[in-house]
Image (cartoon, helix red, strand yellow):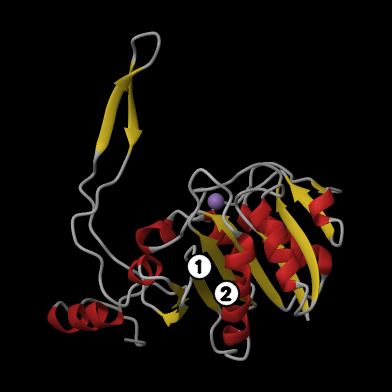
Amino acid sequence: MRILISNDDGIYSPGLAALAQMAAKFGEVRIVAPDVEQSSKSHSITSSRPLRMRRTYIPQLNDFEAYRVDGTPADCVALGIYTWGKVDLVLSGVNLGPNIGNGIWHSGTLAAAKQAALHGLRGIAFSTPAHEDIPDFDTVMPWAEKALEMLLPHVQLPLVNVNVPPKPKGLAWTCQSFRHYDGYIVPGKDPMGREHFWFSVRPIEQVEPGSDRWAVDNGYVSMTPLRLDLTDEKLLNDVQHTAPVDASCSMA
Ligand code: MN
C-alpha cells in the first residue's frame, strides 16, 4: 500500500514525522508537505503561479522520501498523487492542535485529506491538542495507530477526521460538533496608534454529547466520517415541495 503523508503545520513539524513513522507499519510512505506553516488555510489551491517541489533531507524524516512544496496542503496532496503515480491512502497531520467542530471549515489538515477524497482516494486527518509543549507522541501515536487499524478495513469511508486527546482511554465514533459563535472580535492599537482587530470566537452553546468535541474533552479518540457533498437533502426536499420552481435536483 502506498501512503502519501501531508499536513498543514509544514514539513518540519514533529507531528508529520510521528505520523510517517506510524504509517510505515502499514505500507510504503512518501511525504509531500508545505515548506512553511499553512494552518487555517482551508482548501486553498495555488492557481496563479507555478509550484516548486524540492527533495528535503532532515534527520527526523531520514527513513522517507520527502518533498517540500511552496504551496498549500491541497497543492501538496495533488502534487504528491501526480508525481508518485499510484497512491492508495492519504494521511494528514498529526496536526498540533485539535480540528473539531466548526474548525473543520478552515482546517488545512482536513483539506489535505479532502483533496485525496476529491481524487477518489481515501483521506484521513489526524490532530491532537497542543499548547505550549510538543504533544506526547509516545502516548498519542499508539492510539492514532489503533484508529487507523479500525478505519482501514472500512473502505466505504472516504474521508475521516480523527482527533486524539492527550491521554486517550478509548475510541469513539462521533459527529461533528456544531455551535454558533458570537462574532467576538478584540480591537486594539498597533505601535503607530492605528486601529487593528484580533479575530476571536466564543461559543454560545454547550458541548453536544457524542460529538467530536465531547469525545476529546472526555478522553476518547474521536473518529468522524465526513462527506464532500454538503447538500442538506431534507431541506432541499422541503423547499422543492413548498416552493416549486422551474427545475430541481432529483436526488433529494
Ligand atoms: Mn496546523
Task: Please report the residue visible at 67 percent of the width from the left and 71 percent of the height from the top.
Answer: 90
Q: Which residue is mark 1?
A: 164
**Could one spot residue 226 in this view of the protein?**
no
Q: Is residue 124 left or right of residue 243?
A: right
- Residue 250 placement (x, y as % from top left): 34, 87
Task: Please report the residue visible at 78 percent of the width from the left and 45 percent of the height from the top.
Answer: 52
Location of the N terminus by quadrant is bottom right
Confirm or reject: label 2 Cβ below 8 Å from ligand 1: no
The mark that comes first in sequence, 1 or 2, is 2
The relative height of residue 94 versus residue 223 in the rendered view (above or below) is above
Q: Quadrant of residue 50?
A: top right
Marks 1 and 2, Cα distance to the nearest angstrom?
7 Å
Secondary structure at numbered mark 2: helix
Dot 2 amino acid type: Trp
The relative height of residue 40 versus residue 206 in the rendered view (above or below) is above
Picture disc at residue 143: 2
Q: Residue furthest left?
A: 242
- Residue 134 placement (x, y as % from top left): 58, 49
Q: Are marks 1 and 2 in contact (CB under 8 Å)?
A: yes
